[in-house]
Image: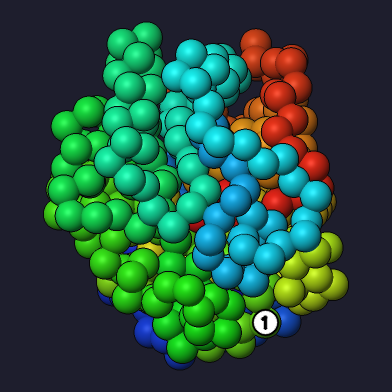
């Protein structure tokens, strides 16, 4: 018998956008219906992305010492989380770290720096790194994540060879001021707009598990759809000791899968990326989530340890997927564990 999920998938495949009411129903289905939900959602994934997975790798150019007060972040002002703090990496070191990820199968390198936003000297540092990286790997996509952009900076990055810009909205507008007050929701959406207007592919996602309601998760995903974010990282909060959200464990593995499924139905043709906290929250359901998402980060996050690169590559290979840009990933399953960048477990893959 054809299920409601199947009917919804057929409708989405026919180009009919789902409603907020339908999205909310996806988030609140009973756990015994989870396999039916995943089966229907995976059909949409396969239609647009086949059995491919995009592998992304983070290079943390500058860590900690951030003046913003984001309550979820170990790098924020006032955080007492035990993390590494350092200023800008030298160009050669940044490229060396990027090469490690590319060697493990990454087709996109994400250059990330903590702080409210870059100065012009910071933009010059990034363009130098991008120039050298593109000279060595012209086929690799580069995504920059540097915070709030000033006028003209996005175009400078685009001229230097940057392909995409990440700036997460993180949560629904109706919940935003609960998690941060040092910048506004409009500040974030303005930066996304500047990136897009300058020819950069907009990358923006969210963090779930902050204490938001189901309705606010729906609100955030619909906002990302309307912002035309090409890639949507889904981060799962890890409540760091030493941050205001310490001890707030609000998610279950099945809830996380439902969130990823809902994202696929709302944004059927967008890149849905499993990002920070996936290992801790999805646990044994990571493979199930990968049949809905089509992208993930390899190895570690910013101040965080992800699972070993070998495990990430085995997850992809064992489930019948292939890595974009590679005909056969089996030779990469024994890739050495990627460098550990920090202490603790940081959920924010890009902020």
How many residues crowd around disc 1 within 10 Å: few (fewer than 14), some, or many (20 or more)?
some
Q: Nearer the viewer, residue 211 or 222?
A: 211
Disc 1, SS: loop
**Residue 109 horizontal/vertical position (percent):** 46, 31
Of the 4 image quadrants, the one containing the N terminus is bottom right
Figure disc tally = 1
Q: Nearer the viewer, residue 73 or 166?
A: 73
**Residue 324 horizontal/vertical position (percent):** 45, 28
5 shown above or below 62:
below
* Residue 329 showing in the rendered view: no
**Residue 285 horizontal/vertical position (percent):** 75, 54
* Residue 122 showing in the rendered view: yes
Q: Which residue is mark 1?
A: 211
Residue that appears at 37% across and 9% down: 136
Residue that appears at 29% across and 54% down: 149
Residue that appears at 32% across and 76% down: 186
Q: Nearer the viewer, residue 170 or 312?
A: 170
Quadrant in the picture for residue 289: bottom right
229 shown above or below 105:
below
**Residue 150 horizontal/vertical position (percent):** 24, 55
Residue that appears at 60% across and 51% down: 65
Q: Is residue 35 left or right of residue 8?
A: right
């Amino acid at each position: 018998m054809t299920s409601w999920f199947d009917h919804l998938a057929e409708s989405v495949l026919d180009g009919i956008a789902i409603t907020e009411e339908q999205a909310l129903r996806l988030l609140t289905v009973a756990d015994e219906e989870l396999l039916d939900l995943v089966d229907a959602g995976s059909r949409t994934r396969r239609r647009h992305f086949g059995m491919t997975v995009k592998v992304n790798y983070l290079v943390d150019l500058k860590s900690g010492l951030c003046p913003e007060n984001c309550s979820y972040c170990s790098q924020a002002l006032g955080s007492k989380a035990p993390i590494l703090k350092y200023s800008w990496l030298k160009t050669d070191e940044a490229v060396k770290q990027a090469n490690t990820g590319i060697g493990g199968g990454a087709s996109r390198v994400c250059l990330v720096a903590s702080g409210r936003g870059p100065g012009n000297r910071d933009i010059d540092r990034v363009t130098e790194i991008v120039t050298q990286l593109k000279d060595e790997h012209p086929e690799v996509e580069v995504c920059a994540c540097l915070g709030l952009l000033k006028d003209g900076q996005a175009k400078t990055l685009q001229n230097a060879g940057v392909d995409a810009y990440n700036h997460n909205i993180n949560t629904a507008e109706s919940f935003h001021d609960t998690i941060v007050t040092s910048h506004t929701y409009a500040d974030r959406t303005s930066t996304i707009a500047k990136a897009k207007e300058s020819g950069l592919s907009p990358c923006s996602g969210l963090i779930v598990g902050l204490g938001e309601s189901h309705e606010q998760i729906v609100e955030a995903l619909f906002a990302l759809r309307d912002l035309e974010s090409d890639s949507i990282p889904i981060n799962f909060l890890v409540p760091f000791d030493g941050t205001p959200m310490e001890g707030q464990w609000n998610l279950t593995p099945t809830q996380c899968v439902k969130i990823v499924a809902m994202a696929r139905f709302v944004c059927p043709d967008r890149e849905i990326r499993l990002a920070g906290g996936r290992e801790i929250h999805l646990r044994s359901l990571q493979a199930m989530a990968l049949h809905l998402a089509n992208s993930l980060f390899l190895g570690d996050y910013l101040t965080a340890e992800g699972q070993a690169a070998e495990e990430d590559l085995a997850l992809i290979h064992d489930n019948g997927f292939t890595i974009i840009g590679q005909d056969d990933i089996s030779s990469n399953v024994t890739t050495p564990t990627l460098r550990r960048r920090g202490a603790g477990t940081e959920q924010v893959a890009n902020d």
